[in-house]
Image: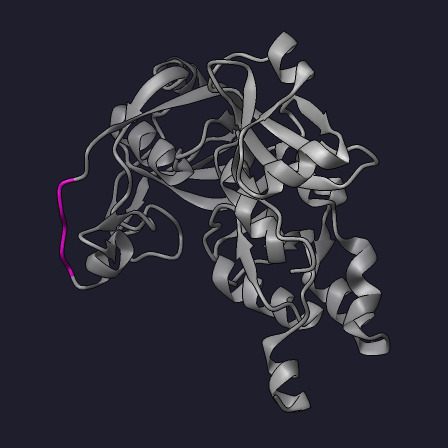
Amino acid sequence: MSLARRRNRGRSINGIFLLNKPLGLSSNQALQRVKNLFDANKAGHTGSLDPLATGVLPICLGEATKFSQFLLDSDKHYLSTFTLGVSTETGDSDGQIRGERDASSITLSQIENAVETFRGEIRQIPSMYSALKHNGQPLYKLARQGIVVEREARTINVFSYKILAFRPGRTAQMDVEVHVSKGTYVRSLAEDLGELLGCGAHVSALHRHVAGPFTDDQTVTLDALEIMRENIEPSGLDDLLKPMDIAVADRMAVDLSPIVASYFQLGQAVMSPQAFRNGQEGDIVRVFREGGDFLGVGEVTEDGKVAPKRLVVEGA
């Protein structure tokens, strides 16, 4: 195999890069930029942000992609601005205006009462302009063709919904901070609130400042990454990567002796005193070889063993 061909494959590098996604790029566009800058052979992000949105976008490189689902399943925190009195096709300011209604009579008291409806466990119908799929096609692609399909309401949890500021007017604006479970669409929160208030609404700004265990202050901007890359080889960026196991840092850790670890890596369920004493059947645990090497995640079985669920391929 030629050197050029090997270079096209990219480097085998494992870890999580915390990007502060800029305005105007899709999550996939941002992902490809990061992948190229690291010269990585494999990459995946952990929860889409629309071009309108900015903020925390964890990008998994190499073997870390095996654990991206755990970050997808984590809670998220957003800061957002809702514009009242204007509804759009997409539920955000990137879409064409669908309707305008005078919002000057809307008061902060009305908003506070309406917001209470959306706190806690609620049912939410996903936007047609979401990445969810219908018969293999992303909903947003169908929506762009003028096709609307029925979407089933899903149970989500809005743990916190704070009104930070309200600016009244014919076209009013409100700043909010929300802490939500996976699968929550902030644009749907805005649209549903506008519908309840009778004036329509859309998202005009959106910033994700917490994603699972990661926060804004841990992120690196794309501009900063590109400037660093101008003067160094891709390997010079590796210190920016978080270890793979941070994706499952909230799970119980299990240490295996080298011999037991070798059986675990071969796909066999193994006995673990830690899992037997402290685990429950079905628990997902992070598994280490004594000495610190992260081997992957396992599931506690009925008899207290740990069965492999996602394994790190060493040397990959």
Q: Is residue 172 above or below residue 112?
A: below
Count every numbered label the image shows and give the total: 0
User: Can you name the residue that lies furthest to the top here?
Assistant: 277
Nearer to the camera, 115 or 282: 282
Camera sees residue 165: no
Q: Nearer the viewer, residue 104 or 280?
A: 280
Name the one closer to the observer, 143 or 156. Answer: 156
Image position, residue 255 (x, y; %): 73, 27
Q: Position of residue 87 (x, y in %)?
A: 29, 44
72 on left or right of 212: left
Foreground pick, 25 / 163: 25
- Which residues are the magenta region? 146-150
Way the structure is coloured: one colour
Res. 142 image quadrant: bottom left
* Dominant secondary structure (helix, strand or loop) of the stretch shown in magenta: loop
Q: Is residue 285 left or right of residue 108?
A: right
Asked if residue 117 is positioned above or below residue 10 in the image, the reply reads above
Residue 156: x and y, percent? 37, 24
Residue located at (39% from left, 35% from top): 183
Residue at 29% x, 58% y: name it.
96
Image vertical order of residue 17 relative to residue 69, above or below: below
**Residue 119 location in percent, x, y?**
41, 16
Within the magenta stretch, is there residue 314? no
The image quarter in which residue 259 lies: top right
- Left or right of 156: which side holds 314? right
At 13% from the left and 47% from the top, the residue drawn is: 149
- Which residue occupies 58% across, 13% down? 279
